[in-house]
Image: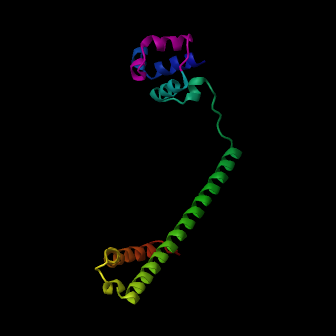
Amino acid sequence: MLNENMKAIRKSKGLSQEGLAVRLNVVRQTISKWEQGLSVPDSDMLISISEVLETPVSTLLGETVSEPKADDLKVISEKLEMINLQFAQKKATRRKIFHWLFISLCALIAIGFAVWIILNSPYLGWDYNDPETAVAGAVFHALEWLFVRLAPFIFIGAMVGIFATRKKG
């Protein structure tokens, strides 16, 4: 069955055994053996043959493809509708999660600024003659410096995210 179908499809596509062999990176004798039924291609080669001949593997193997019935179409339609509903629910859930993450990020930034204001940089009054205190003070100062400079941009981005993920309608 495979050998006859392969030969007929190859000829209908206007390919010679040599032409098919070149496209599959095999020798012409291999194509000849397949078409005479003396050997069969492995599964990977069968897929390559179907791609080169632009024909489904099932057709090469001789399966008859039945037309779907009206009841089958209805079942498929219902399944697709269910899948679409599941995707919509997942999308809505993901949107809600991101929305609340953006709100939380804004709240954390606001709390961070409140903490920095309340603390009023207490490490500035530390004794920096002690090496450990000097290192800790430098670390706190670097963190404060980064926070004060990056937080406004992150806050604006989070606000944009809140508006972009809000429920429409």
Give how far across and how far down residue 66 sits, in percent.
65, 34
Q: Is residue 52 left or right of residue 78?
A: left
- Residue 50: in sight, yes or no? yes
Give how far across and how far down residue 50 sits, in percent.
50, 27
Q: Is 46 in front, or is 6?
A: 46
Residue at the spot 36% in from the left edge and 88% down from the top edge? 120
Q: Is residue 38 magenta?
A: yes
Give how far across and how far down residue 165 sits, in percent.
48, 71
Q: Main secondary structure of the magenta part?
A: helix
Q: Is 1 in front, or is 44?
A: 44
- Residue 15: in sight, yes or no? no
Q: Which residues are magenta?
A: 21-41
Residue at the spot 40% in from the left edge and 89% down from the top edge? 118
* 15 over 69 or under it: above or below: above
Q: Is 51 in front, or is 91?
A: 91
Number of numbered discs present?
A: 0
Q: Is residue 5 left or right of residue 111?
A: right
Q: Quadrant where the N terminus lies?
A: top right
